[in-house]
Image (spheres, rainbow, N blue to C red):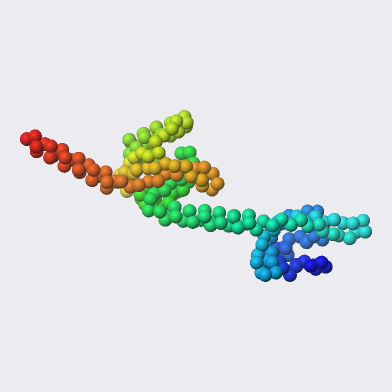
Amino acid sequence: VVGLKYPYPWWPTETREQFASEDSPESGIDLHRHERCYRKKNGEPFWIVTSIRNIRAKDGLLSLVSNWLDITERKRMEETLSESEENFRNSVENSPVGIQIISGPESFYANRALLELYGYSTIDELRAVPREQRFTPESYDLWADRRAKELRGESLPEIYEISIVRKDGTVRTAEVYVKDVIWNGKKQSQLLYFDITERKAAEERARDAEVLQEYDRLR
């Protein structure tokens, strides 16, 4: 490779294009630092980070001192992590369980199932509704009490029931599970909503039936 001039033959097309769009070493810039993809003799790609310093001798001759660090494994890990995050987001978005990600009191993500539970099309539409209108009065008081205890640093049950008011005014009951999750690199709260409206109605009918049976027995 001694005596070759850039663009070098082992550079892939994207690296040649990137280098052509930047200042060349003759431009007088003292230090270049780049991440680039190259190809081995067998065609296998590998990533390096290069630090290039321009050194000009007393006679005016420009020389380059280049340090190479192989970061191929790091790049592979970053790609794997990116794919894992994408798969996680896809599974969350397509989950039949309502999922909400909140930071403090504010919700910044709601999947399709949660929006359908509330009857809204987008999270912006949901957020535009005042919080006290999203719940029945009793459930809003429960939310406010949990929020106050959270701000005081008190421990809270991870599971609770709440009654929400849909866009059309109907009420649904949900069992909510709260747990921590890493989202966009930060620790946030994830709420899982299970619609238990029908189950609660069935339980209520069963209790009414038991009361009637007991009443008939005592007559």
**x 90%, y 57%: residue:** 57
Relative vertical location of residue 180 with respect to residue 2 in this rendering, above or below:
above
**x 54%, y 44%: residue:** 186
In-image side of 188 versus 126 (left or right): right
Residue 71 image-quadrant placement: bottom right
As drawn, which residue projects farthest toward the left?
A: 219
In-image side of 14 versus 81 (left or right): right
**Residue nearest the observer in this picture, 197 or 12:** 12
Q: In the rendered image, which quarter contains the N terminus?
A: bottom right
Q: Does the image show residue 104?
A: yes
Q: In the rendered image, which quarter contains the C terminus?
A: top left
In-image side of 185 versus 124 (left or right): right
Q: How far across and down, in percent of the image, does residue 141 sit?
A: 36, 34
**Residue nearest the observer in this picture, 178 or 48:** 48
Residue 211 image-quadrant placement: top left
Q: Does the image show residue 130?
A: no
**x 36%, y 36%: residue:** 140
Count of marks, rendered view: 0
Q: How far across and down, in percent of the image, does residue 159 sit?
A: 37, 39
Q: How far across and down, in percent of the image, does residue 19 sit?
A: 72, 63
